[in-house]
Image (spheres, rainbow, N blue to C red):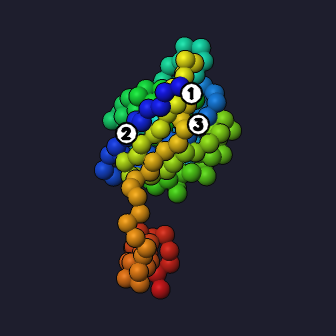
Amino acid sequence: MDTKVVNVKVPDGCNAILGQSHFIKTVEDLYEALVNAVPTVEFGLAFCESSGPCLVRYEGNDPELKELASKTAYQLSAGHTFIIFMRKAFPINVLDKVKSVPEVCNIYLATANPFQVILAETEQGRGILGVVDGFASKGIENEKDIAERKTFLRKIGYKLRT
């Protein structure tokens, strides 16, 4: 068995979701889940089929993000893996819908950070061992950091203003 690391850069203004599913209809079901969660979301998604023709299947409503998703999925080439790149929505807005797609088995990450996917490669194929999301912690927040976190959450509308 060999291990490989694939570096993934998330474009500015975008978020990514990486997961595992189990059926060819994943691309269409994830498409529906995303637009049902946030109708104005812009996205591209791709799914690594791991039987039959073993193609990267892709969908979306943004040509640039569709291309990015399909190229990233092909770079991973890990069985039944899917990747979503999206704008105009955050993972928190769509994750419940994505997780509720019947064929979705696992979510590895949801992030705007650059990330690394750690793969195992055998004679049969590839699988995801884990992910590195962003960077190592640099410290523990202090009172000023706490105040900034609370202000930020209210500024973007995720907490009530007081």
Query: Which residue in the structure is indicated by mark 3?
Result: 20
Q: Tell me the distance, in whole angstroms, between the alpha carbons under discs 3 and 2.
A: 18 Å
Amino acid under label 2?
Answer: Asn
Q: Residue furthest left?
A: 12
Q: Are marks 3 and 2 in contact (CB under 8 Å)?
A: no
User: Judging from the image, what secondary structure is the residue with disc 2 in?
Assistant: strand
Which sits in the foreground, 32 or 130? Answer: 130
- Above or below residue 49? Residue 132 is below
Query: In the image, residue 131 lies at what x, y percent?
Result: 49, 44
Residue at x-position 40% and y-position 58%: 136
Q: Residue furthest right?
A: 102
Query: Which residue in the structure is indicated by mark 2?
Result: 7
Query: Which residue in the structure is indicated by mark 1?
Result: 79
Query: In the image, residue 45 lies at what x, y percent?
Result: 47, 36
Q: Tell me the distance, in whole angstroms, between the alpha carbons under discs 2 and 1.
A: 18 Å
- Residue 26 seen anywhere in this rendered image of the structure: yes
Residue at x-position 42% and y-position 76%: 141
User: Judging from the image, what secondary structure is the residue with disc 1 in?
Assistant: loop
In terms of image quadrants, where is residue 64? top left
Which sits in the foreground, 12 or 2? Answer: 2
Residue at x-position 44% and y-position 51%: 133
Which numbered disc flags the more N-terminal residue, 2 or 1? 2
- Above or below residue 117? Residue 110 is below
Determine whether, in the image, residue 87 is placed left or right of residue 103. Answer: left
Query: In the image, residue 162 lies at what x, y percent?
Result: 47, 86
Q: Tell me the distance, in whole angstroms, between the alpha carbons under discs 1 and 3.
A: 8 Å
Residue at x-position 56% and y-position 51%: 95
